[in-house]
Amino acid sequence: MNKKEIRHNWTISELEEIYNEPFNDLLWSAHQLHRNYHDPNEVQISTLMSIKTGGCPEDCKYCSQSIKYDTNLEREKTLPLSEIINQAKKAKSHGATRFCMGAAWRNLTDNNLEKVIKMIKEVKKLNLETCVTLGMISIDQATKLKASGLDYYNHNLDTSEEYYSKVVTTRKYQDRLNTLECVRKAGIKVCCGGIIGLGESKLDRIKLIHVLGNLKEHPESVPINKLVKIKGTPFFENADVDEFDFIRIIALTRIVMPKSYVRLSAGRDSMNDQMQALCFFAGANSIFYGDELLTAKNASEIHDQLLLDKLKIRTV
Ligand code: SAM
Ligand code: DTB
Ligand code: SF4
């Protein structure tokens, strides 16, 4: 495959064939392609902050922040701007180049939009890239976010269209696609991926990558999350994800979207160093850095430093 072969016309059976190759062949193809488009010894780091925690009306069966489940999470109001700026400064001093702000909203209200615009403007002043994840937005709101300097909007499809209703019932797959289209039209970079471990089949995972890979433009950033099992949510007792299956999905994502950043996202605290190293070899080149994700624990900063040092991976 060469640089002319960034494709948007994948078939599901092609993806199945790639996914089912012998493990070493799959990893080797993914790694070679990875080297054609990226520095294999470099990982982009982003830091996450929850700017509004809990009380979300959606029923995503994996999420600690849904009001539908008793997860023992303390609901908070939107944090004040000063607190957000302090966290962004801290993230920058710890080496992050992108600051991602997440809110437990179903959709963005115009009142909250004004608050977020202020946050984006202030974070941009620190010379950090900005990313927000705020639920559904309209084209008008996306345009305003872009004008305020927003670089990325995160909005995950999570799984295949067929399995989606087993994960969320309060919105449709098409709602997610509509927001993604608004983000794209407004000229904001797209961060869109999914979660492995929702009880989905291998085919559902492949179908998710198929949808992402056949978007008119590939998302610039593709987070692959491993389910963080949250007590009180319907998915708390889900079976563990087979690690080789997880690595296969990272490799497939790299092959289908060669230029994109593939983020080894939530769930790293339950992966050992060797597993993470294989994910980096298979094409992952972005992580969340910082002791916390939104409400759950991340791999610790100290541990990440040691791991990246051992692997001689530079951060950008
Ligand atoms: N409310 C907004 C939304 O749903 O788009 C933004 C915040 S939401 C927490 C962002 C993403 O985090 C979700 O789309 C999901 O992919 C991921 N996520 C949430 N809880 C998770 C969990 N327990 N394990 C893995 N990923 C999770
Ligand atoms: C993404 O794909 N993963 C991040 C980010 N985008 C917003 C969120 C992970 C959340 C993990 C569970 C928690 O902290 O509550
Ligand atoms: Fe709400 Fe987002 Fe959690 Fe779903 S994933 S319950 S939309 S915060």
Image (tube, rainbow, N blue to C red):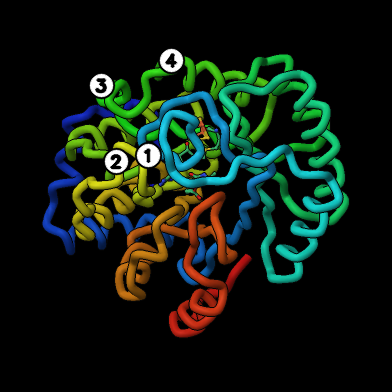
Pointer 3 local density, CA inside 10 Å: few below 14, some 14–19, many at least 20: few
- Compared to residue 91, the image places residue 140 above or below, namely above
Distance (Cα) linking label 3 and label 2: 18 Å
Regarding mark 4 in the picture, which secondary structure is present there?
helix
The reply to whether the C-beta atoms of the residues labelled 4 and 1 are less than 8 Å apart is no
Q: Which residue is mark 4?
A: 174
Regarding mark 3 in the picture, which secondary structure is present there?
loop
Q: Earlier in the sequence, mark 3 or mark 4?
A: 3
Q: Which residue is mark 2?
A: 235
Quadrant in the rendering for residue 243: bottom left
| Disc 2 CB within 8 Å of nearest ligand 1 atom | yes
Regarding mark 1 in the picture, which secondary structure is present there?
loop
Q: Earlier in the sequence, mark 2 or mark 1?
A: 1
- Compared to residue 206, the image places residue 172 above or below, namely above
Q: Residue at x 26, y 26 (%)?
A: 163
Quadrant in the rendering for residue 78: top right
Q: Earlier in the sequence, mark 3 or mark 1?
A: 1
Viewed as shown, does residue 187 lie left or right of 18? right
Q: Estimate the x, y position of residue 16 in percent, counting from the top left.
A: 17, 38
Q: Which circle marks residue 162 in the picture?
A: 3
Distance (Cα) linking label 2 and label 1: 6 Å
Q: Earlier in the sequence, mark 2 or mark 4?
A: 4
- Compared to residue 161, the image places residue 133 above or below, namely below
Distance (Cα) linking label 3 and label 4: 12 Å
